Image (cartoon, rainbow, N blue to C red):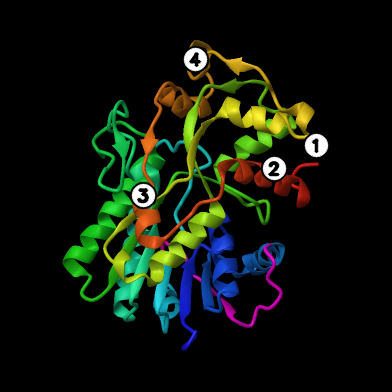
Amino acid sequence: MENIKTVLVTGGTGFLGGHTIVRLLQKGYKVRTTIRSMHKKNAVIGMLKNGGITSFGNLEFIEADLTRDDNWAEAVKGCAYVLHLASPFPTGEPKDENELIIPAKEGTLRVLQAAKDAGVKRVVMTSSFGAIGYSIDPKNHIFSEEDWTDTAVKNTAYIKSKTFAELAAWDFIKNNGDSLELTVINPVGMFGPVLSNDFSSSIQMIAKLITGKMPATPKLSFGIVDVRDVAELHIKAMTNPMAKGQRFLAYSATTTLPEIAKLLHSQQTKFSKNVPTKVLPDWIVKILAYFIPELKQVASQLGKLKTISNKKSKNILHWNPISYKNTILQTAESLTKFAIIN
């Protein structure tokens, strides 16, 4: 690289944040990352070491929280690009959806304003397929970047928070952005090798499968993408002139929980025998959803097979995702490698 650029990565402690920092450092960028507390610095360094990083001279940390103005001006100072990956994620459904929606929206606007004030060239923001595919009837429909989830439709607080935050980001760029550029990445469910015990909720499903904590699998279908591919897509979108003002779906394939269980069960590992082979009928899942809050979202998506297009990401950014089977198997391997499951 002719001039080493500095990139700000928000949410350095996260699953996607860790993999993105690894890729940036490997590519020769200087990286500054925000963490909510400096007490988390050593945990991030440990995570990056697990990702293969041995030199940390091009990495710096700054304490910043999406809910406060403190340090954001300093965080973006001198940065050519901002990868805004941080977003509040609930452990459960909040009593009031605004507990999630307001911080997600205001945090995004806080980052964009700071980036604009500092003369940052482009912000690449992590949104979600949740902002695309949760209000349109999936029958005979191919989901693309042209689609939006209707915020007036009943959905989980998380899906609404991602939709409102992305809408606010585009509105900011249109009305107040000046020369600041915005690109948005919309991933489906993220899987892939974990670098620590801080990982996406989707990976909790793999952990439950290989430990036998999920005794049977509902017939739930969903999109999968490898976290390493999502990190790479952010970086490609960061520098490609054609990515300005665009959304990109991060999607590899669609599968089902029973198919994942079958794949894991077929492997000759000490965990294979724990993986369930029974499939839960839909009617049982719907009944259980009345008593188990985590199953409510699952029950609402039963029978909804969504066809998703990643042509735009492939054609414009020359992005080629990893095979979903490799992603799932490497996810399981990493859970045992780092003694998260033993």
Mark 1: amino acid: Thr
Evaluate if marks 4 and 1 touch, with contact meaning CB atoms under 8 Å apart. no
Q: CA distance from mark 3 to mark 2?
A: 28 Å
State the residue position of label 2.
Answer: 332
- Rendered position, 301 above or below 26: above
Mark 2: amino acid: Ala
Residue 221 x %, y %:
48, 29
Sequence-first disc among 4 and 1: 1
Task: Magenta stretch: give its range.
Answer: 51-68
For marks 3 and 1, give the one nearer the viewer: 3
Horizontally, is 221 left or right of 38 in the view? left
State the residue position of label 1.
Answer: 269
| Residue 138 included in the magenta stretch of the image | no
Q: Mark 4 packing: few (<14 Cα in 10 Å), some, or many (20+)?
A: some
| Quarter where residue 336 is shown | top right
Residue 69 in view here: no
Residue 190 x %, y %:
52, 46
Question: Which of the pair 15/318 is nearer the observer?
Answer: 318
- Rendered position, 88 above or below 261: below
Q: CA distance from mark 4 to mark 1?
A: 30 Å
State the residue position of label 4.
Answer: 282
Sequence-first disc among 4 and 2: 4
